[in-house]
Amino acid sequence: ANGTGPNGTYVYQLCFCLDKRFSNPALDMMIRADDEFDVILNGNFLGTWGGCFNCPTPVGLTFANPNLFRPGENCLQIVVRNLGGVVTGFNMQGSVRATDGQCCCEPDDLFRDIASGVDDTGGLIASGADDDTWTVTVDAAGGTVPRPATVINPNSAWLTIPGTKWIAASYTGPNGVYTYEYCFCLEKWFENARLIMDLRADDNAEVYLNGNLVGATPLIYAFNTPLPTHVDVTNQTLFRVGENCIEVVVRNTHGVVTGVNIAGSITARNGLCCDDRAECGPRPDGLACEPVTCPDAGQTCVPVCYNVNGDTVTVIDCDCRQPDECHAVWPGTLPAQIICEGGCPPGMDCIQRVTQRADGSVDYCCECVENPITGACCFSVGGCVILSQQACQSQGGVYLGDFTSCLGDQACCLPNGACVDTDALCCELVYGGLPQGPGSVCLGDANGDGRDDLCYPPTCSPVPGTLRCRNVQCPDLGEKCKPRCVRVELGTTYVIEVLDCECVGPNDCHIEIDSLTREATCVGGCVGLNAYCHTTFVDLGDGTAKMCCECIDIPEPYSCCNAETGQCLDLIPGATSCPVGYTLVAGPCGNLQACCLPTGVCVDTYLACCVDMGGTPMGAGTSCATTICPAPICRPIPGTTLCSSTVCPIAGQECLPRCVRVEPGTTNVIEVIDCDCVSPNECHIEVDPASNSFFCVGACPPGMTCRTIVSDLPDGTQQVCCECVDDPTPFACCNIDTGECLDLAPGTTMCPPGFSLVPGPCGNLIACCLPDGTCIDTFDACCTEMGGMAQPAGVTCESSPCGLTVNCLPVPGTPFCFDTVCPIAGQECRPRCVKTQPGSTFVLEVVDCDCVSPNDCHIEVDAANNWSCVGACSTPGAFCQTIITDNPDGTITICCQCMIP
């Protein structure tokens, strides 16, 4: 235990298992110890012996009395006493033996239900929740793997196997491969193993057992075939002792939705593994985890999730973890606080996930996630937790921004005068209250005036460590508490924190801070003909500066500045004329000092000239000989469509826009929000100064193309970025009148007259059932372009395979959907996606339809063929949003769908 330990007692323990059928047990040992030792077996004291640490022969002991042993766990203890000296320890050789003594379990049959969207009790899992039966191991959308599949609502064109639900890695995932895995154990004496599975998929799927292909759906429309694909595996050579894994490989080949729907089971006589019978989980009383034997040495069954309901704390999930692995801990104090302890594999963090239940109780779970950008997350139930933005919003929290921190509990005064003890940031953002400072606590209403004795009208002041002022009631109607002074990085306007606030009107001089770039700008005006809103900087000596916006009188007289030489000429009062090469600026010239320009260059000039050049004055007495200006950063100029004038690190590169914020569904640029140093010939955004519209321009490396990536922002606008992505798959040309199809070479997009460009390749010659019930013999790609349903290989139109369509599909080449009888009363077949030109609302054609009620989120096409997103969303927190996707032919696809920002 400690080689140089003090005198005293040291106890060493070894435990082993004996099966209930054991006989003839024996324990053999040869021991040396410093200084003497006792032997105890299952609490039975067997004797004391001298340590004999330097005897020629060690102490030899054998114990074979059956009454000393017992079925199950047996524990041997060696109690060593160090009686003299500064060293201690023991040395042993030995063994435990018994006839039929190895612990094992009785043979038992295996049955595993592998239905998707079904929980362990047989109930259906709520849409949006995890299905931990199936694990996503390959995600074409680039999500974290492995992770549980997500239960989803089916698309209106899908059929669902009774008693199951659809699952997906990503409901709106791109084309590509998605793999779902389920693994199970077979005991060494298993017999008659069998896998039975029915499945549907969008668009097709293959089933593998231990790497062997055992079944496959039709290549397309595997989501609404009359019967699901059936797989029945009884070949015993495909099963194996120990872990077996089923993989369902789904290929999304067309459209913006994908998923898989599974029913089935695994059975085997005498196949249930021993380890599957003693699962790590909560005890029935919820006070702790079951004391099971975990599969790996050193692991114990520990809590990973607790439920807190008032003063009642219950363990709801456990897992086998090493002591230093991520797990949940409740110290046992009230009010309950659940703590995440332990580490994670490299590249991951131990993060707490908080979920509120319908009964008001809260689940706290600790899990390893890939290192996300995290920030403070506030919950309406109280508490502040560090989470990623996605995790926070998915759990109903309010995300306070990247890298923000929880400030700790303190008294929070509410607008009605009441007081609660909660986190300072959550106080403001969730309760709309005012934090009272670290260490403060609510005092109660001792004077009976209806207001907590701590909570009286607050002053306009900063929220410490944030970019905000307190939300207080200003004395004059229309005024708000706004920043007056901020702390910035030296030589920039990048805000670190707010230092001072004051109550001002919306048009009065104050500081505005851009929420995306954190850049500070002086805005507003001042009272008086000779007053203006002036920016001042004071070097704080720690690499930061104090920036303030204040009203000052316009200085007179004026002065003249030469931007090339840095010279400055003071003018007499009233004079406003400057020599050639000089610019009139507000004077006087001021002191000669170092001036840091936005390019990172330092010039020695005068205060007035430095400000006129857009530079940062470094203070009287400074010079460029001793001043190091901050390196220029390629970043947007807040509130404009321009990037900063930055000298890029590589010759030939310029600071050009990469992402812009636009009005939804248009190319109208509101402002540039990200810039990058690139060559003018590389992929980037070009903003037309005349129309304020953006274009993706420039080239990409071989095998990639410059594409437009669109995403919605929380304020209702959209972010558009131009990035290099992999080239699309080859195209094909279809003649929808004759059914002919021509494959094009990669990169070619020109079709002969009478043919339409479609995603390739052509595929197989098949019978295609069109939405109006007619049939045409054509190719896979053309059938998809016509909005038809491909029939199985070998089926031709001569066999009349097509009946009346019941699918909600677009009428090809028109702004209409087919007049379909939808499956739910009150629903109608309405457009979901349309094709149009960039910057236009005129519909070229409808490309996707869905059965929805008239009040649900969808696209409305008016009599003039103009589109608009209308309707509401039933999911809490979801909004009907516009999604824009570039098409290879220069058009764009507009889709309206419900999304949670």
Image (cartoon, rainbow, N blue to C red):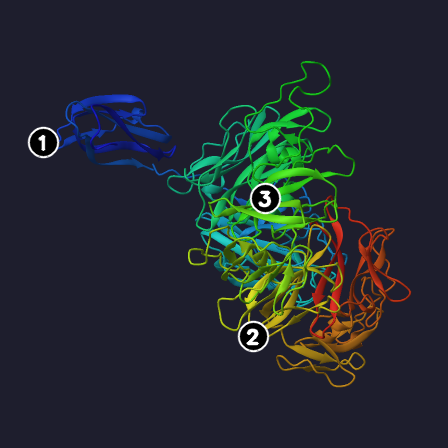
Left or right for 50, reference 405 = left
**Front position in the image: 312 or 289:** 312
Q: Is residue 119 visible?
A: no
Q: Nearer the viewer, residue 605 or 833?
A: 605
Q: Which residue is mark 3?
A: 486
- At which x and y percent is residue 280? 49, 37
Numbered disc in front, either 1 or 2:
2
Position of residue 233 measured from the top left corner of the image (x, y, whole percent): 57, 58
Comes first in the chain, label 3 or label 1: 1
In the picture, which quadrant includes the N terminus?
top left
Residue under pointer 2 = 703
**In the rendering, at what x and y percent does residue 230 appear?**
65, 59
Q: Answer left or right for 779 relative to 560.
A: right
- Identify residue for label 1: 55
Let me know if residue 329 appears in the view: yes
Q: Foreground mark, 3 or 1?
A: 3
The part of the image, by quadrant, that contains residue 862 is bottom right
The residue sitting at 63% across, 32% down in the picture is 382
- The residue type indicated by label 1 comes to Cys
Residues packed near mark 1 inside 10 Å, few (<14), some (14 to 19) or many (20 plus): few
Q: Residue furthest bottom?
A: 752
| Three-letter code for the amino acid on which mark 3 is drawn | Val
Q: Are marks 3 and 1 in contact (CB under 8 Å)?
A: no
Please, is residue 825 above or below residue 649 in the view? above
Name which residue lies at 87% across and 51% down: 826
Tag on residue 756? none
Are the two marked residues, 2 and 3, in contact with CB atoms closer than 8 angstroms?
no
- Answer few, some or many: residues within 10 Å of disc 3's Cα (few below 14, many 20 plus, some between 14 and 19): many
Q: Is residue 136 above or below residue 292?
A: below
Amino acid at circle 2: Gly
Q: Secondary structure at mark 1?
A: loop
